[in-house]
Structures are given as structure tokens and as C-alpha cells.
Amino acid sequence: MIFALAGNQNCGKTTLFNQLTGSNQHVGNFPGVTVEQKEGTVRKEKDVYVVDLPGIYSLSPYTSEEIVTRDYLLSGKADGVINIVDATNIERNLYLSMQIIELGLPMVIALNMMDEVRANGAAIDIEKLSQELGVPILPISASKDEGVDELVKVAVETVRARRLPARLDFCTGAVHRAIHSIAHMVEDHAAAIGVPPRFAATKLVEGDEPMLARLKLSDNEVDMLCHTVAEMEGEVGTDREAAMADMRYTFIEKLCADTVTKQGESKEHLRSIRIDAVLTHRYFAIPIFIAIMALVFWLTFGVVGAFFSDLLDAGVQGLTALTEQALIDFGTNPVLRSLIIDGVFAGVGSVLSFLPIIVVLFFFLSILEDSGYMARVAFVMDSLLRKIGLSGRSFVPMLIGFGCSVPAIMATRTLSSERDHKMTILLIPFMSCSAKLPIYALFTAAFFPAHGALVMILLYVVGMVLAVLAGLLFKDTLFAGNPVPFVMELPNYRLPSPKSVALLIWDKVKDFLTRAFTVIFVASIVIWVLQTFDVRFNIVADSADSMLAAVGRFIAPVFAPLGFGDWRAATALISGFTMKEAVVSTFAVLVGGGSLNAALAGIFTPLAAFAFLIFTLLYTPCVAAIGAVRRELDSRLAAVGLVFFQTGVAWAAAFAVYQVGRLLGF
């Protein structure tokens, strides 16, 4: 038994999915968290599955989310639908419910956030609402796990009994006549493609081109359709889409007037308005956002994160020393001992010590997201993004890009414009992903210990400034045109859920540890082998005579004008193409035992170190991100082009930093 979980954006859909399945999907308090369908098994129910579909406001095929949801609901894969409705905003949410009811599938409505409704002194006559809509309605609070078990029980019973919605007809007057006339005309065509005739008719009345193409009507039938719609438009005095929307909202308004008792504006909404008066202020919004992010970076890299990172680093060093002594006492072969200590422990251990920084950073970012603040930032950024040809909606994928480029690139599917979709994908690599944090932390600790937070802020700002410049370039060349209108729901501010924050942090920790003990583990061994042996696989006394050095020296001249022509720097950058954390592990393996910071001081000057940071900020994304670009753009040429474009920009920026710095005497 498979249930489709459908609802508006930000109505608690992913929260309910987590409660139903025990899944660890991240829940965010801004629209567009779910960008593709996710499936899980319902707890306590054998062979019952639920598919979490992207949040949408209607079943019109205008956005990628609507297309994904609509195609799944029409595919026949779902045995039933759980439609989650935000009880605090019931009028808007029921618009989608009415369209899902027209699909004629077994269905239950989960009336979510009923705890907030009660707290605001409002009331909903659920029994009458259920009778009027013709489907079972269950009051729940997904975030508190209230009513979820009863919802599952009723949903399963509804599907097993094949109880279809008792009411499909919500129209009156001219719209009623048009829908029913067209439904009779297309009945055979609709049956042939497995679509309910009434649903097909409502879509045709709305002017749904994909539905018209699927039905394969004859020319005479298309003429009759056009005549019927024109007659309806003439009678109601408005266009076809407005007529359908007006019909639905007229029904919803009357229904809510009979079943919903409100006690003024909700406390949550009033509180959000007061907070927004400051945080979305016309002049202060952006300075406040910069100040908040500066505080986050200062706490991450200058206080909390740095403290725990130093603590873990000391632990790793202690464990390394104990292991090395144990291997010596055991009489282990020196080559094997070097592999374990100088290869595995140096490579993996050097990366592990930066785990606390990632945990602390995402702790703060998760709080900002779950509270609803990040949705406001997207709203505030709309006017700025429009200057480079994008809308504020592109800010959400870019924001995700600060965590990882792969889900950020996937999140561009939520953009309604193909132009915005492609352009945003090409700008995401300018956002500094979390995989680069170990590189930043290592170099700031080695060369700029007193100004770590400032250097971090500067790196992020440089990435964003160059993204703006690239956007201006793309706007007038590859992607000439105007951005789509920006419509985005601003959710009420809410206290972040400890569970949601913990799940996001655990997800990042798990991903980091998985990569540390797989890709970095293997990369460290490969680097150790290449820098320990020459081309005849004889052990070298000096790593400068190794196979790795030969490759590094071949490439190093390219980076000499940037201030880091050492073969070890070139080698580290090449390994970073697999994953950015590998840059740190490569340096750790190459310099052998002793202090990594001291060894780096022998390779870089402070100015060259900063130029190196600029290059790592901007050069080609990792292999996984390039793969995501190829899949989303369906073009190998675009993916390869992005590699050369990003690397070219990185080289030019690092060259400018180093050469200008030298002229200024740094």
C-alpha cells in the first residue's frame, strides 16, 4: 500500500513524513525543502509506504515541483493520498485539496498545526468540514506527534475499503455547465490515459496545454472545447483561469465561514510582523544579515569551533603517538609503520580535527533556517538578485550551496524558469561549500591566527561578489532576458526544533565521517604510495624524488605566478578535485611528521597563502558536483565548460590578489 503525501509548501509535510516513517529527512522553515519525491515505510504498519512529494499550491504544470507531484498522482502508483493542510491558513491550503479530490483517489486530510489553532482561541468544526468535502479529516500536530497514529489508522482503512471522495462537484453556474459538458466530451479520451474525466475537464477549462496534448482530441473536439470555454468566459465576464480560481475560492470562503471560528490574528503572526519590522527593514535588513553571519563566523572560527577543534586535534595527535609507539614496540616493518602513521593517520586525522568547526557552523545555520529567518533573507535579497537577472527564489539554492553544492544544484529544480534554473546552477560553485572549511581553518590557523574570523568572512564575501560579477556577465550574454516574478511564502517565526537541528548536524557529521573514512582514507594511501616510491617503485629518501613530485613539478609552473609554485601545492589542488577536504589530507601526508602549520610556512608566504585560499574558494567544484551539473543540465559539454570556467576565474582572482599584494608590499 502506497500513500502520496501532498500539500502546500511549508505546511509541515516533511515533519509528518518523519513522524510517519521515522526518517531523518531535514525539516526547514522555508518553502522548497523537498525538491524530489522521497519514500519511506510507515512505522507499525507492515507493507505500507509513504512518498513525500514536493510542496505545491496547485496541480497546474507551471513549476517543476507541480510537475513532479502531478505526474506522480496521475501515474497510478499511489493507492491513496494523505493531503496535509495547515489549519492556521486553511483557506489557501484547501485550494489544492479541492483539486486532489477531483482525482477521485482514496484520500484523507491531515489538518496540521491544530495546537496553534487552539492556542489562538480559534476552532474548526472538523465533522462538518469533512461532510462538505466528502473525505475523512483528522486533526494532528505533526511537530508534537499528536494524532499521527489515528491518521495512519484511518488512511489505511480508507484505502482498504476503497472509499473514494463522496463529493467531486464544487462548481455552479456557467463554470458548472462548461466542466460537465467537456467532461462528457472527453470521457473516452480520459479513460484511455487513466485520468478521471472531471479532472481532465477542469484542466482543459483552465487551459492546461500538457493535458490537452495527452488527451489527443480531434480537431472537431478542440473546436467544441474552445467554443464551450469562450461561452463560459463571456457569461462570467472573466478569463478561464480566473473563472476556475474564483469558483474554487467562492466555495472555500463559504465553507470556512460555516466551519472555522477565528479569534483575530494569530499570536505567531503578530509576533512575526513585529520581528519583521526590524529584520526586513528597507535599510537595515542587509546590514543585520551581515552582522548575524559575522557573529556566526566569529563564534565558529574564533571561539567555540576553534576551541573544540584544538581539543580534537590534541586527541588525534595523542592517539597517533600512542599508535606509533605501539607499532615500534611490536617491531612493525618501518614501511608499513610509515603507511599507517604518515599515510592513514596523517591524512584522515588532519581532516577529522576540523569536524567541530563544521558541527558548530551548521548548528547556527540550522537555527537561522528553522526559525524562519532564512526565508526573510531570500525576500530581502530579491531586489539585489534582480540586478544580476535572477529572482529572490534563487537565493535558497545558493544558500544550500554554502553547505554542499550537490543538493544546492538539485534544489534549482524548484525554480519555475528554465533560464533561472540554468543560471543559478552556474553561480552555485561561487558559494563556498562546507568541504572547503578544513582548508580555510588550516591556513588561517597557520598564517592568520589573530584574524581567523575576518579572513573567513572575506573569503565568503569574495565568492559572493564574483558570483554577482558572473551573473552580470551571464545576464547579458548566455541568459539574456528578465527574471520571473518572485512569490514566496514567509512562514511565521518559530522556535527551532531540537530534533530538526540535531538531525541536520548528524547528517553533516555522518557525511563528513563517511568521506573521511572512505575517499580521504583511500586518497591518503594513494598519496603516500606516490610520494614514497619512485617510478621503479624503489623507496625514496626524499619525497622530492618521488612519482608524485614528478607530476607536481610538471603542473607547478602554472601556479608560480600565483605565489605557490611548489609541487606539493599543485599536488594538493589536484587531489582536491575528488573532494575538497583531500587538500588538507594531501598536505598532511606530503609533509610527513611534525607540525603541519610549520611545514606550510616553508611552502607559502602569508600573501601566497591567501592567494591559495582564493584559488581553493573558486576553482572547479568536486567530481560529485560536476556530475550533478551534468545531470541537471543534461550536457557533458556544460559540465566540462564549468570546470574550465571556474578554474580560469580562480587563477585570475588568485593572480590579481598575489600580484597586487606584492605591489602594495605585503
Image: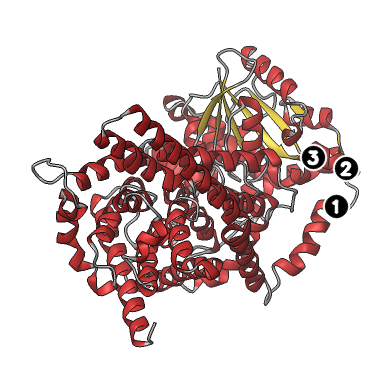
The kind of residue tagged 1 is Lys
Mark 3 residue element: helix
The kind of residue tagged 2 is Ala
Mark 3 is surrounded, within 10 Å at the Cα level, by few (under 14), some (14 to 19) or many (20 or more) other residues, namely some
Residue, disc 2 = 119
Q: Position of residue 42 (x, y in %)?
A: 60, 21
Residue 452 visible in this rendered orientation of the protein = yes
Which comes sooner in the sequence, label 1 or label 3? 3
- In this rendering, position of residue 88 left or right of residue 203: right
Mark 2 is surrounded, within 10 Å at the Cα level, by few (under 14), some (14 to 19) or many (20 or more) other residues, namely few
Nearer-the-camera pick, 344 or 215: 344
Residue 305 found in image quarter = bottom right
Residue, disc 1 = 267
Number of marks in picture = 3
Choose mark 2 or mark 3, whichever is in front: 2
Nearer-the-camera pick, 29 or 573: 573
Residue, disc 3 = 255
Between the residue at mark 1 and the residue at mark 2, the CA separation in whole angstroms equals 8 Å
Pointer 1 with pointer 2, Cβ within 8 A = yes
Extreme residue toward the bottom, this view: 664
- In this rendering, position of residue 452 left or right of residue 530: right
Q: Compared with residue 607, is residue 578 higher up or lower down, i.e. above or below? A: above
Q: Position of residue 139 (x, y in %)?
A: 78, 30
Nearer-the-camera pick, 306 or 651: 306
Residue at 24% x, 36% y is 335
Which comes sooner in the sequence, label 1 or label 2? 2
